[in-house]
Image (cartoon, rainbow, N blue to C red):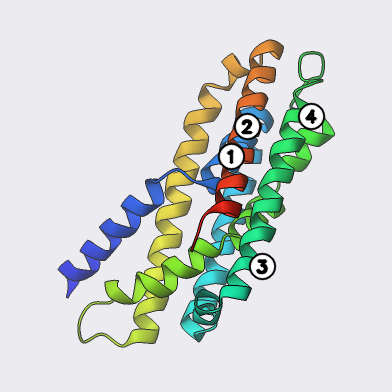
């Protein structure tokens, strides 16, 4: 049983490392707003995971995963939010060459708990992931509800550990990115990436 749980944790860890919208917003926050901004966004992301996890244990996320209309609504809302973040980053890059990014209100606004929480909560793929994959990872003979809750907690712990380590790694390289021209280029790249993720989510099939 323990080996099955460890195998499930390994699968969750591998899936956590796959780059996606969450990592994009963490990257933007950590490189433009510093370590504290990156941590705030990371906590927001895992808060979103906890909400999805609770809905999964209660069986509510299965409704979203099964309903084409609900799925599409959340998908389009999430895509619109990512596109908004991308446009804001590109707009901010116009003044990054002359304004201190750490003190600029737009950058501070981007590196918030709300940014991470909203990005994760408006990602319907999490609902599909939790309702489709998580039940398959429950060790044979274990009670479904408590086991799902345990797997969600494991995923949350793995996610916050990985994102925190990622933020620390990025913040150590931040001195390079604090140069105005470099910061401007970075914001244009992250803005384009966020726009790309938004477009991908909006256009992809379930």
Mark 3 vs mark 2: which is more N-terminal? Answer: 3
Quadrant for the N terminus, please. Answer: bottom left
Q: Residues within 10 Å of mark 1 (few under 14, many from 20)?
A: some
- Of badges 4 and 3, nearer the viewer stands 3
| Cα gap from disc 2 to disc 1, whole angstroms | 6 Å
Q: Quadrant of residue 165?
A: top left
Identify the residue shown where x is 49% and y is 80%.
Answer: 62
Q: Where 55 sits versus 111, above or below? A: below
Provide the residue designation for mark 4. Answer: 91
Q: Where 158 sits versus 173, above or below? A: below
Identify the residue shown where x is 28% and y is 58%.
Answer: 11
Mark 3 vs mark 1: which is more N-terminal? Answer: 3
Mark 1 vs mark 4: which is more N-terminal? Answer: 4
Mark 4 vs mark 3: which is more N-terminal? Answer: 3
* C-beta proximity under 8 Å, tags 1 and 4: no
Provide the residue designation for mark 1. Answer: 196
* C-beta proximity under 8 Å, tags 4 and 3: no
Q: Residues within 10 Å of mark 3 (few under 14, many from 20)?
A: some
Side (left or right) of 143 relative to 81: left
């Amino acid at each position: 049983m323990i080996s099955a749980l460890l195998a499930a944790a390994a699968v969750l860890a591998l899936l956590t490392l796959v780059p996606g919208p969450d990592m994009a917003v963490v990257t933007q926050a950590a490189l433009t707003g510093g370590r504290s901004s990156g941590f705030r966004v990371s906590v927001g992301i895992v808060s979103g995971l906890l909400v999805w996890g609770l809905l999964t244990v209660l069986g509510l996320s299965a409704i979203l995963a099964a309903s084409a209309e609900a799925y599409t609504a959340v998908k389009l809302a999430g895509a619109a939010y990512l596109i908004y973040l991308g446009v804001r980053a590109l707009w901010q890059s116009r003044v990054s060459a002359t304004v201190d990014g750490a003190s600029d209100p737009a950058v501070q606004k981007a590196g918030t708990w709300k940014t991470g929480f909203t990005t994760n909560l408006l990602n319907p793929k999490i609902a599909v992931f939790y309702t489709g994959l998580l039940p398959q990872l429950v060790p044979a003979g274990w009670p479904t509800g408590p086991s799902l809750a345990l797997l969600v907690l494991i995923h949350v712990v793995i996610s916050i550990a990985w994102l925190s380590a990622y933020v620390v790694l990025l913040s150590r390289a931040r001195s390079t990115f604090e140069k105005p021209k470099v910061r401007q280029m970075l914001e244009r790249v992250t803005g384009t990436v966020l726009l790309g993720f938004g477009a991908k989510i909006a256009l992809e099939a379930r």
